[in-house]
Amino acid sequence: MAARTPFRPFTRAEGPSGELIEAGYRGPQIELVTRDFDLDMAALDDLNALFGPSPDWKSLNATQKCMIVAELRQMAGDRPQLPIPSTALIGVARRG
C-alpha cells in the first residue's frame, strides 16, 4: 500500500481551483456542500474515539472537553442523535 501524503494547506492563492489546475485538470468547479452528520449521543461516552484525530480536540483541556459534552447533551435533549452540520469543498474538473 502506498504511503499517504500528509495534509497540507492550499499553496496557491486561487485555493482548490488553483490546486486542481496545477495538478493537470481544467475547468474546475468548486462547491461548498453541507450535510448533517448525525452524532450518536451514545458516542459521547468515548469522545476521544470520536474526535481523537482532530487537532482541535487534542488542544482542549479536560475542563473544555467536559463543557463541550455538556453543551452537546443540552442541545440534543432527549434525541438519540444530534444533527451536526458538516461542510466540505467538492471539486469537479476535467483531466488534461
Image (cartoon, helix red, strand yellow):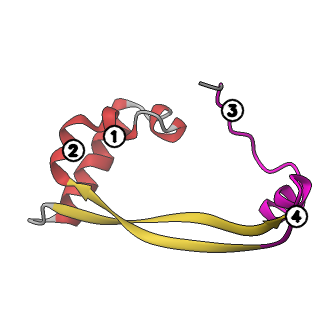
| Residue contact at pointers 4 and 2, CB within 8 angstroms | no
According to the picture, the residue beneath numbered tag 3 turns out to be: 6
Q: CA distance from mark 4 to mark 2?
A: 38 Å
Q: Which residues are magenta?
A: 3-28
- The x and y percentages for residue 75 are 23, 65
Answer few, some or many: residues within 10 Å of disc 4's Cα (few below 14, many 20 plus, some between 14 and 19): few
- The x and y percentages for residue 68 are 32, 48
Answer few, some or many: residues within 10 Å of disc 2's Cα (few below 14, many 20 plus, some between 14 and 19): few
Hey, which quadrant is residue 50 in on the image?
A: top left
Q: Earlier in the sequence, mark 4 or mark 2?
A: 4
Q: In the structure shown, which secondary structural element does the residue marked by tag 4 occupy?
A: loop
Q: Is residue 44 left or right of residue 95?
A: left
| Residue contact at pointers 2 and 1, CB within 8 angstroms | yes
Tag in front: 1 or 3: 3
According to the picture, the residue beneath numbered tag 2 turns out to be: 43
Q: CA distance from mark 3 to mark 2?
A: 28 Å
Q: Which numbered tag is attached to residue 58?
A: none
Answer few, some or many: residues within 10 Å of disc 3's Cα (few below 14, many 20 plus, some between 14 and 19): few
Answer few, some or many: residues within 10 Å of disc 1's Cα (few below 14, many 20 plus, some between 14 and 19): few
Taking the view exactly as shown, the residue that stands out farthest to the front is 96
Q: Earlier in the sequence, mark 4 or mark 3?
A: 3
According to the picture, the residue beneath numbered tag 1 turns out to be: 50
Q: Amino acid at mark 3?
A: Pro
According to the picture, the residue beneath numbered tag 4 turns out to be: 14
Q: Amino acid at mark 1?
A: Leu
Q: CA distance from mark 1 to mark 3?
A: 21 Å
Q: Earlier in the sequence, mark 4 or mark 1?
A: 4
